[in-house]
């Protein structure tokens, strides 16, 4: 496909996703998720070309407002917006008025007055992005809010799985490690359940939320039992910065019980693939050799899919704003 000189990717199917914002996976239907994955698929091909600029979002302004540090998510949203032709601005929160006592909503209203079309927001408090979306006039994308949701991560994970294993329905996916602090786990559980996959979570009791069994998952505390015959092993980072108490015995002991190495991976299906949203704590939740094993690790592909998914989301949201007439 040579699309480098056309203004926008033509979607083969009508886009089912209808919404002014993307605040979470909760509430999205299987058809909406599939239509976003299908649209992202065309951006994967496009991103592999030498020339990568479209005019889909030409004239639109996208502001990335990150109250928590981020490498891959922020870079990915920035590239996605730029490849679609938007004017992209990154708000450096560390040097903004937030540090002079301004509230989240005052910052939001200030930015709103600058008439952006898209706001991409990451914030340390669950629910903060939804609150902000209620106050501004533009589309808002949740790039991670506290321990609540990280919808584009779940979508990029789904795209990565679909491309490698053919479909999501009927697969068994194990999500392992620090479930308690993980918005990635929450969004993935919601998405995988909606798409008909079976989800297991494997963690020590101290790293599980209350009532984990009510999430529509099977709960395991033993890696070897939980990994038995799974198709996908999704490892999570130990979010030490969010731990206010000693929730793990020692890093060494945690790796011994819950770190993914070849020995534990041998219990999974022989074709199982390994994923991690990054950033990784090598030697804590995952052995370097497993993370770097190109025959089983999808970690780099997840990053690649991240740009395509974010292009699809920004494209879809701007279609909604222009009346769905594109
Ligand atoms: C995740 C996040 O920020 O929630 N990372 C990411 O978006 N790539 C997971 C994490 O921080 O461990």
Image: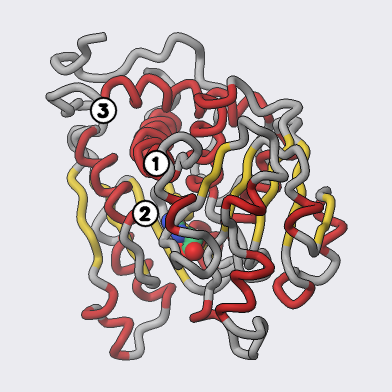
Q: Which mark is residue 306?
A: 1
Q: Is residue 20 above or below residue 32?
A: below
Q: Mark number for residue 73?
A: 2
- Classed neighbour count for the residue bearing mark 2: other residues with Cα under 10 Å, few (<14), some (14–19), many (≥20): many
Q: Is residue 80 above or below residue 36?
A: below
Image quadrant containing the C terminus:
top left
Q: Are marks 2 and 3 in contact (CB under 8 Å)?
A: no
| Mark 1 C-beta to ligand 1 under 8 Å | yes
Label 3, on which residue?
Answer: 47
Q: Residues within 10 Å of mark 1 (few under 14, many from 20)?
A: many
Q: Is mark 2 within 8 Å of ligand 1?
A: yes
Q: Position of residue 210 (x, y in %)?
A: 81, 71
Q: Report whether residue 321 is seen.
A: no
The alpha-carbon separation of the residues under discs 2 and 1 comes to: 8 Å
Residue 87, given in percent of the width and then of the height, sits at 18, 45
In percent of the image, x 73 and y 37: which residue is there?
172
| Whether label 2 touches label 1, CB < 8 Å | yes
For marks 1 and 3, the one nearer the N-term is 3
Q: Is residue 5 above or below residue 25?
A: above
Give whichever of discs 2 and 1 has the lower sequence position.
2
The structure residue drawn at horizontal position 81% and vertical position 52%, both measured from the top left corner, is 225
């Amino acid at each position: 496909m040579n699309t480098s000189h056309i203004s926008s990717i033509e979607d083969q199917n009508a886009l089912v996703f209808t919404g002014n914002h993307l605040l979470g996976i909760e509430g999205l239907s299987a058809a909406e998720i599939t239509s976003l994955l299908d649209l992202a698929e065309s951006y994967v091909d496009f991103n592999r070309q030498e020339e990568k600029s479209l005019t889909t979002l030409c004239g639109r302004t996208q502001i990335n407002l990150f109250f928590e540090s981020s490498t891959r998510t922020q870079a990915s949203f920035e590239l996605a917006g730029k490849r679609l032709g938007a004017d992209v601005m990154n708000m450096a929160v560390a040097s903004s008025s937030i540090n002079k006592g301004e509230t989240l909503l005052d910052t939001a209203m200030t930015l709103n007055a600058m008439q952006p079309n898209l706001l991409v927001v990451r914030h340390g408090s669950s629910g903060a992005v939804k609150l902000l979306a209620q106050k501004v006039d533009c589309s808002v994308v949740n790039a991670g809010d506290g321990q609540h949701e990280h919808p584009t991560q779940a979508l990029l994970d789904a795209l990565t799985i679909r491309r490698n294993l053919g479909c999501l329905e009927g697969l068994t996916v194990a999500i392992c490690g620090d479930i308690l602090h993980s918005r990635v786990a929450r969004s993935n559980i919601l998405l995988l359940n909606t798409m008909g996959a079976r989800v297991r979570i494997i963690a020590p009791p101290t790293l599980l939320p209350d009532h984990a069994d009510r999430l529509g998952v099977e709960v395991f505390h033993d890696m070897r039992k939980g990994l038995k015959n799974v198709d996908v092993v999704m490892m999570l980072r130990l979010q030490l910065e969010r731990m206010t108490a000693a929730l793990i015995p020692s890093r060494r002991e945690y790796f011994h019980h819950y770190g993914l190495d070849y020995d534990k991976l041998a219990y999974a299906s022989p074709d199982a693939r390994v994923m991690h949203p990054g950033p990784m704590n090598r030697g804590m939740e995952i052995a370097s050799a497993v993370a770097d094993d190109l025959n089983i690790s999808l970690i780099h592909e997840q990053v690649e899919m991240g740009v395509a998914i974010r292009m699809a989301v920004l494209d879809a949201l701007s279609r909604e704003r222009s009346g769905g007439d594109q």
